[in-house]
Amino acid sequence: MNDLNPSGWRPSTGSSEPGAWRPTVTGHRALEQDEPLLFEIGSLDGCGVDFDEDDGAEMLDALPRRTTPVALPGLSEPEAVRHYTRLSRQNYAIDLGLFPLGSCTMKHNPRLNEKVARMPGFASVHPLQPQQTVEGALEVIAQLADWLVALTGMASVAMTPKAGAHGELCGLLAIRAALEARGEADARRVILVPESAHGTNPATAAFAGFTVAPIPANPDGRIDLAALLERLGDDVAGVMITNPNTCGLFERDMKTIADAVHAAGGYVYCDGANFNAVVGRVRPGDLGVDAMHINLHKTFSTPHGGGGPGAGPVVLSQALAPFAPLPMVVRDEAGKPRLIEDPAERTDAFGRMCAFHGQMGMFTRALAYILTHGADGLRQVSGDAVLNANYLLASLKDVLDAPFAESGACMHEALFSDAGFAEGFSTLDLAKGLIDEGFHPMTVYFPLVVHGAMLVEPTETESKAALDQFIAAMRDLARRAKDGDPALKAAPVHAPRRRLDETLAARKPRLVWKEA
Ligand SMILES: *Cc1c(COP(=O)(O)O)cnc(C)c1O
């Protein structure tokens, strides 16, 4: 490690050529400033705030006093503000550039949504306010619910789940409640989950108390229909199918599968996280789906990442609608929204997913997005998302292996693999190289059905110019990975941190700072 550069930033070459990189005294790189922990920059002995010596001492004397120091770093306000601002500059964000994470739909969050969500009448409502004081908020929830039901062709929607995975749980609990009502909950304990499913699907099924039976994918990246039909029986509670699936393909057999599952006495859960690819074109209700979550933070442009908040409303078929959790917003005969909280009013409801009505800020943002686009605009969203992904696929498939390029057009995301890279080079190297090019890497090593997978989702809001720049970077990196360029193994060289031991970080996270 270089003494002048304790931060771990390394020159890409040690060359003293004019113009070559040399370590800076500070460890900073121009406007990118290296940033230690708060505890490392602030001293535990000092205090960043100027208190009067005897301010409140009399009052304090009457109270029990702590005997150990509080151990907070003594920083002034500007020092603390700078710390967090510097850290924020090291973050890649959707407002900085193309964010090609597949299976995540990191799309632009229009500023109008933010403005609407911050209107005091929405931003300041409290979940315990009397209903007659929050009629506008209830109308927003009801209007958004109307849109979700119309766009999906379903009977009803449970608005309270707080994320996609939470919605999956809601859907499976509704399925369990329906089976209980039929007296078959003990007999039907198996959920069929294709191998290409998002990881949350089998996790949710297990969490809800079901046994997971995996269904293989066929060579073209879709569900093996024969294997699925073969496995149906009177122990099966239902299936969980992601459509469009995680290989970026539309499951064409969805209706056939749904009909067969229903005939065998089961229910159909659809993971609707990829609704961005089909919104305005396909109504899951027409395909025989009984329950599907919608990630408002993907399809309807509310912010996500960094742990939320998200929102995962679950649309329900006629068969499952009675079991939807409380609270529930319904419209009375006059069309006025009303919040049902009392289980006596909805005796079949399986319970509650959370204390209150859901993520109000996400509802207002999603409704603002839907209303600014309108039905035709939403249809264009899915068209443009699919067009952009296919443009990437077509522009890269001569330099990167695209395992399902022969399976027809992709949906909103394009899947590649590291087949053909030089010995010792893999997906990880290309992804790290993308960081040097100023992009967030795509989703890597997922879906598991493809070795060394790279799942790229540009979304509909990227211009052709932005896509072309990304394609140029990807083509160059693919060439370097195939040629075995040793410099690629060192990437990223321009980032504040280099290659971290991600396994160690996950297995042995050091979450507590200890003074050296
Ligand atoms: C994002 C995603 C989920 C999980 O949604 P969260 O809101 O992150 O809980 C589930 N399935 C698929 C296919 C997804 O892309």
Image (tube, grey):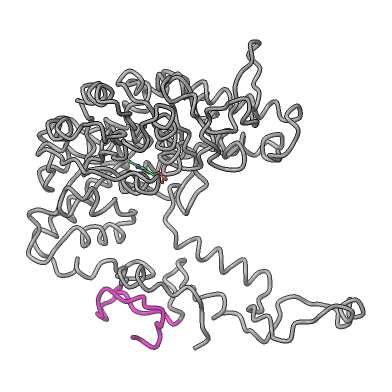
Q: Position of residue 3 (x, y in %)?
A: 39, 88
Q: Position of residue 313 (x, y in %)?
A: 48, 34
Q: Nearer the viewer, residue 202 or 18?
A: 202
Q: Position of residue 240 (x, y in %)?
A: 30, 36
Quarter occupied by residue 387: top left
Q: Nearer the viewer, residue 310 or 44?
A: 310
Is residue 10 a member of the stretch shown in magenta? yes
Q: Nearer the viewer, residue 456 or 348?
A: 348
Quarter occupied by residue 299: top left
Q: Residue at x 46, y 21 (%)?
A: 149
Judge whether 334 appears above or below 229 on screen. Answer: above
Q: Nearer the viewer, residue 347 or 395?
A: 347
Q: Which residues are magenta?
A: 1-25
| 365 horizontally vs 203: left or right | right
Q: Position of residue 126 (x, y in %)?
A: 71, 40
Judge whether 502 appears above or below 151 on screen. Answer: below
Q: Residue at x 32, y 73 (%)?
A: 504
Q: Residue at x 49, y 24 (%)?
A: 322
Of all residues shown, which one is farthest toward the top? Answer: 334
Of all residues shown, which one is farthest toward the right? Answer: 58
Judge whether 99 appears above or below 83 on screen. Answer: above
Q: Quadrant of ligand 1?
A: top left
Q: Residue at x 29, y 39 (%)?
A: 191
